[in-house]
Amino acid sequence: MYTGQAMSCIFCKIAAGEIPSTAVYQDELAYAFADINPKAPIHVLIVPREHIVSLSDAAQDHRALLGHLLWTAAEIARKKGLDKGYRVVLNNGELGGQTVDHLHLHLLGEQQMTWPPG
Ligand code: 5GP
Ligand code: ZN
Protein backbone atom coordinates (compact mmCIF):
# COMPACT_ATOMS: atom_id res chain seq x y z
CA MET A 1 0.00 0.00 0.00
CA TYR A 2 1.14 3.56 -0.54
CA THR A 3 0.11 7.11 0.25
CA GLY A 4 0.66 10.73 -0.78
CA GLN A 5 2.34 11.50 -4.09
CA ALA A 6 2.99 7.79 -4.60
CA MET A 7 -0.73 7.30 -5.31
CA SER A 8 -0.26 8.82 -8.74
CA CYS A 9 3.12 7.19 -9.40
CA ILE A 10 3.20 4.69 -12.24
CA PHE A 11 6.16 2.73 -10.82
CA CYS A 12 4.51 2.46 -7.37
CA LYS A 13 1.46 1.04 -9.12
CA ILE A 14 3.59 -1.39 -11.14
CA ALA A 15 5.46 -2.54 -8.00
CA ALA A 16 2.10 -3.04 -6.23
CA GLY A 17 0.78 -5.12 -9.15
CA GLU A 18 -1.94 -2.58 -9.98
CA ILE A 19 -0.51 -1.97 -13.44
CA PRO A 20 0.63 -5.10 -15.30
CA SER A 21 4.32 -5.65 -15.96
CA THR A 22 6.65 -8.52 -16.77
CA ALA A 23 8.31 -9.29 -13.45
CA VAL A 24 11.99 -10.21 -13.52
CA TYR A 25 12.85 -10.19 -9.80
CA GLN A 26 11.16 -9.20 -6.57
CA ASP A 27 11.80 -9.12 -2.86
CA GLU A 28 10.60 -7.07 0.10
CA LEU A 29 12.64 -4.02 -0.91
CA ALA A 30 12.81 -4.05 -4.70
CA TYR A 31 10.83 -4.92 -7.82
CA ALA A 32 12.33 -5.42 -11.27
CA PHE A 33 10.44 -5.62 -14.54
CA ALA A 34 10.94 -5.43 -18.30
CA ASP A 35 11.06 -1.91 -19.77
CA ILE A 36 8.03 -1.29 -22.02
CA ASN A 37 10.24 0.40 -24.64
CA PRO A 38 13.49 -1.60 -24.56
CA LYS A 39 16.72 0.06 -25.69
CA ALA A 40 18.67 -3.24 -25.72
CA PRO A 41 17.75 -6.95 -26.05
CA ILE A 42 17.65 -7.07 -22.24
CA HIS A 43 16.31 -3.89 -20.62
CA VAL A 44 15.15 -4.28 -17.03
CA LEU A 45 14.04 -1.54 -14.63
CA ILE A 46 14.82 -1.99 -10.94
CA VAL A 47 12.81 0.13 -8.50
CA PRO A 48 12.61 0.37 -4.73
CA ARG A 49 9.16 -0.51 -3.38
CA GLU A 50 9.40 2.72 -1.39
CA HIS A 51 8.52 5.82 -3.37
CA ILE A 52 11.73 7.85 -3.71
CA VAL A 53 11.52 10.48 -6.45
CA SER A 54 15.14 10.46 -7.57
CA LEU A 55 18.70 9.76 -6.43
CA SER A 56 18.87 13.40 -5.33
CA ASP A 57 15.93 12.74 -3.02
CA ALA A 58 17.49 9.68 -1.39
CA ALA A 59 18.25 10.28 2.28
CA GLN A 60 21.02 8.97 4.53
CA ASP A 61 18.61 6.26 5.71
CA HIS A 62 18.35 5.00 2.12
CA ARG A 63 22.03 4.09 1.77
CA ALA A 64 21.50 0.37 2.33
CA LEU A 65 18.50 0.38 -0.01
CA LEU A 66 20.57 2.04 -2.76
CA GLY A 67 23.19 -0.67 -2.33
CA HIS A 68 20.48 -3.32 -2.49
CA LEU A 69 19.24 -1.95 -5.82
CA LEU A 70 22.75 -2.23 -7.28
CA TRP A 71 23.14 -5.76 -5.92
CA THR A 72 19.76 -6.61 -7.47
CA ALA A 73 21.03 -5.43 -10.87
CA ALA A 74 24.08 -7.71 -10.54
CA GLU A 75 21.91 -10.63 -9.37
CA ILE A 76 19.57 -10.28 -12.36
CA ALA A 77 22.56 -10.03 -14.71
CA ARG A 78 23.99 -13.26 -13.21
CA LYS A 79 20.65 -15.06 -13.58
CA LYS A 80 20.39 -13.90 -17.19
CA GLY A 81 23.93 -15.06 -17.94
CA LEU A 82 25.30 -11.62 -18.81
CA ASP A 83 28.82 -12.73 -17.89
CA LYS A 84 30.46 -10.77 -20.74
CA GLY A 85 29.18 -7.48 -19.33
CA TYR A 86 26.24 -5.16 -19.15
CA ARG A 87 25.39 -1.56 -18.30
CA VAL A 88 23.57 -0.09 -15.31
CA VAL A 89 22.16 3.42 -15.78
CA LEU A 90 20.50 5.84 -13.37
CA ASN A 91 19.03 8.97 -14.97
CA ASN A 92 18.65 11.70 -12.36
CA GLY A 93 16.49 14.79 -12.82
CA GLU A 94 15.61 16.77 -15.91
CA LEU A 95 19.09 17.22 -17.35
CA GLY A 96 19.90 13.62 -16.46
CA GLY A 97 17.08 12.45 -18.73
CA GLN A 98 14.79 11.12 -15.98
CA THR A 99 11.22 10.82 -17.27
CA VAL A 100 9.55 8.84 -14.46
CA ASP A 101 9.74 10.41 -11.00
CA HIS A 102 10.37 7.22 -9.04
CA LEU A 103 14.03 6.29 -8.63
CA HIS A 104 15.01 3.40 -10.91
CA LEU A 105 18.04 1.64 -12.33
CA HIS A 106 18.18 0.49 -15.94
CA LEU A 107 19.94 -2.83 -16.57
CA LEU A 108 20.88 -3.10 -20.26
CA GLY A 109 22.48 -6.14 -21.82
CA GLU A 110 23.07 -8.57 -24.68
CA GLN A 111 24.59 -5.98 -26.97
CA GLN A 112 27.85 -4.02 -27.19
CA MET A 113 27.29 -0.73 -25.39
CA THR A 114 28.99 2.44 -26.57
CA TRP A 115 30.47 5.41 -24.72
CA PRO A 116 29.81 8.26 -24.17
CA PRO A 117 26.02 8.27 -23.86
CA GLY A 118 24.17 11.31 -25.19
P1 5GP B 1 13.92 7.26 -17.37
O1 5GP B 1 13.85 7.96 -18.69
O2 5GP B 1 13.05 7.94 -16.33
O3 5GP B 1 15.29 6.96 -16.87
O4 5GP B 1 13.30 5.82 -17.63
C1 5GP B 1 11.94 5.55 -17.60
C2 5GP B 1 11.75 4.22 -18.30
O5 5GP B 1 10.49 3.73 -17.94
C3 5GP B 1 11.78 4.31 -19.83
O6 5GP B 1 12.81 3.47 -20.34
C4 5GP B 1 10.38 3.84 -20.24
O7 5GP B 1 10.40 3.06 -21.41
C5 5GP B 1 9.92 3.05 -19.03
N1 5GP B 1 8.49 3.06 -18.80
C6 5GP B 1 7.69 4.15 -18.77
N2 5GP B 1 6.41 3.79 -18.51
C7 5GP B 1 6.43 2.42 -18.37
C8 5GP B 1 5.40 1.47 -18.09
O8 5GP B 1 4.23 1.78 -17.92
N3 5GP B 1 5.79 0.16 -18.03
C9 5GP B 1 7.09 -0.24 -18.22
N4 5GP B 1 7.35 -1.55 -18.13
N5 5GP B 1 8.08 0.65 -18.48
C10 5GP B 1 7.75 1.96 -18.56
ZN1 ZN C 1 6.56 5.78 -6.83
Image (tube, rainbow, N blue to C red):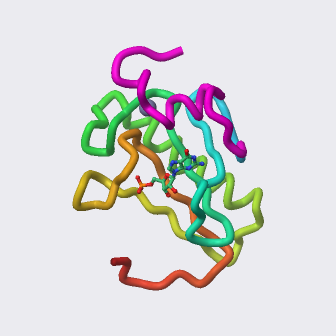
Residue located 68% across and 54% down the image? 76
Q: Is residue 103 magenta?
A: no
Residue located 53% across and 69% down the image? 87
Can you give x and y, in whole percent of width and height, for residue 73 in the image? 59, 53
Query: Compared with residue 34, is residue 19 higher up or lower down, i.e. above or below?
Result: above
80 or 97, which lies in front? 97
Q: Could you say which quadrant of the image residue 9 lies in?
A: top left
Query: Compared with residue 77, is residue 15 higher up or lower down, i.e. above or below?
Result: above
32 or 10, which lies in front? 10
Q: Is residue 13 magenta?
A: yes
Can you give x and y, in whole percent of width and height, for residue 57 in the image? 27, 37
Dividing the image into 4 quarters, which one contains the C terminus? bottom left
- Which residues lie in the magenta part? 1-23
Can you give x and y, in whole percent of width and height, for residue 18 in the image? 62, 26
Residue located 36% across and 82% down the image? 116
Residue located 54% across and 29% down the image? 13
Q: Is residue 70 left or right of residue 103?
A: right
34 or 86, which lies in front? 34
7 or 78, which lies in front? 7
Can you give x and y, in whole percent of width and height, for residue 85 in the image? 62, 74
Q: Could you say which quadrant of the image residue 82 lies in?
A: bottom right
